[in-house]
């Protein structure tokens, strides 16, 4: 199997989850992208072969002049899992294409938001593979 870190480079992750998706999300949610308190980036967290899982993270990074801590990020896993702009189902389909048969993505879940700091919250994405 190819090194997954070579597949899931920062450039590849940016293509999977473009930076403008956060603006599109806030535009759909509030009618104005400028109302958003954070940017969203996708990071690769690794492959856990013992559990047959790929781990990714959605990093919510506070925007200048906004307050990430003041926003309700703890309910976001449920919102993100269903929101058509965030499109986690489509993201997992695209991830499956990148692993090109080395692994097969089955089920996925967004787990509880982790507060790393007042300016960074992380939503883990766990994908079961076979």
Image: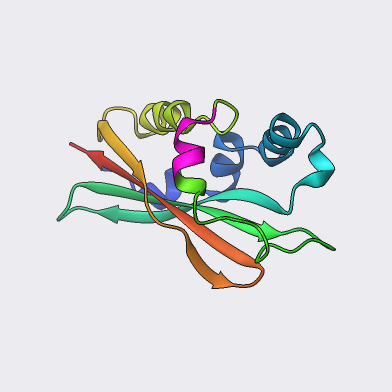
Residue 117 location (% of width, % of height): 59, 74
Q: Nearer the viewer, residue 71 or 20?
A: 71
Residue at horizontal 66 percent and vertical 68 percent from the top:
119
Q: Nearer the viewer, residue 86 or 92?
A: 86
Relative vertical location of residue 120 with respect to residue 59 in this rendering, above or below: below
Q: Image check: 94 left or right of 26?
A: left
Would you identify the image quadrant in which residue 95 lies? top left
Relative vertical location of residue 66 with respect to residue 125 in this rendering, above or below: below
Q: How is the image coloured?
A: rainbow
State which region is magenta.
Answer: 78-83
Q: Quadrant of the N terminus?
A: top left
Residue 99 location (% of width, % of height): 35, 34
Membership of 80 in magenta stretch: yes
Q: Quadrant of the C terminus?
A: top left
Residue at horizontal 44 percent and vertical 48 percent from the top:
6
Residue 2 location (% of width, % of height): 32, 44
Membership of 48 in magenta stretch: no
């Amino acid at each position: 199997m190819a090194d997954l870190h070579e597949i899931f480079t920062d450039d590849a992750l940016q293509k999977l989850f473009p930076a403008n998706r956060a603006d599109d999300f806030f535009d759909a949610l509030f009618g104005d992208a400028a109302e958003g308190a954070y940017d969203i980036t996708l990071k690769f967290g690794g492959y856990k072969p013992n559990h047959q899982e790929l781990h990714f993270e959605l990093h919510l990074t506070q925007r200048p002049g906004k307050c990430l801590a003041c926003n309700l990020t703890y309910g976001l896993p449920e919102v993100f899992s269903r929101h058509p702009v965030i499109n986690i189902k489509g993201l997992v389909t695209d991830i499956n294409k990148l692993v090109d048969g080395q692994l097969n993505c089955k089920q996925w879940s967004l787990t509880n938001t982790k507060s790393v700091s007042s300016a960074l919250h992380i939503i883990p994405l766990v994908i079961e593979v076979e």
